[in-house]
Amino acid sequence: MDFLDNFFDKLYELSPKKLYKRSGKCNMCGKCCTNIYVRHASEPIQTESEFEELKDKHEFYSYLTVVGKDEIGLIFKCGNLVDGKCKIHKKRPLICRKYPQEEIFTMGGALCEECGYKFTPKKVLKKYLIL
């Protein structure tokens, strides 16, 4: 795991807003790159016209191809996945480096069984103020 991956793992772990602790590492199975929901403005992308607008604004979206749609939103596949491996893994965009985030669950998604990452609930210290 390189420096940036370690950095984002630590940053994620320290975030007080997160309810889960992420552990494990990418085993480069490529499954997370084949059924992707992409959020924009805190909502999954819903229409191809919305997607086309985003492609003009962000280079990352140009790598994606729409492969379906369900009740959550459009489903994408990354064009950098070749023979099940990411051809730009060492130079992948920030959105990929931060994957997976716990928001995947709030969007109705899940990690595939083969994923090297796991989420466990964080123990949260609650402070009570007595007035």
Image (cartoon, grey):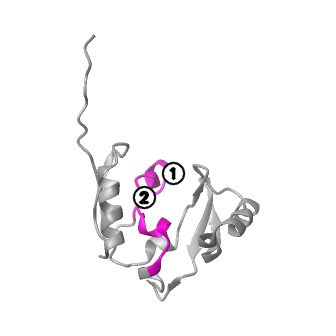
75 relative position to 126: left or right: right
Position of the N terminus by quadrant = bottom left
Q: Position of residue 70 (x, y in %)?
A: 62, 58
- Residue 126 vs residue 118, the one in the foreground: 126
**Residue sitting at 36 percent across and 46 percent down?**
18
Which amino acid, mark 2? Answer: Ala
Report if residue 114 is visible in the image.
no
* Disc 2: which residue: 110
Report if residue 123 is visible in the image.
yes
* Disc 1: which residue: 107
- Residue 111 vs residue 129, the one in the foreground: 129
**10 Å neighbourhood of mark 1: few (<14), some, or many (≥20)?**
some
Q: Position of residue 108 (x, y in %)?
A: 49, 52
**10 Å neighbourhood of mark 2: few (<14), some, or many (≥20)?**
few
Rendered view: 12 above or below 96: above
Give the SS element for disc 2: loop
**Residue sitting at 64 percent across and 57 percent down?**
45
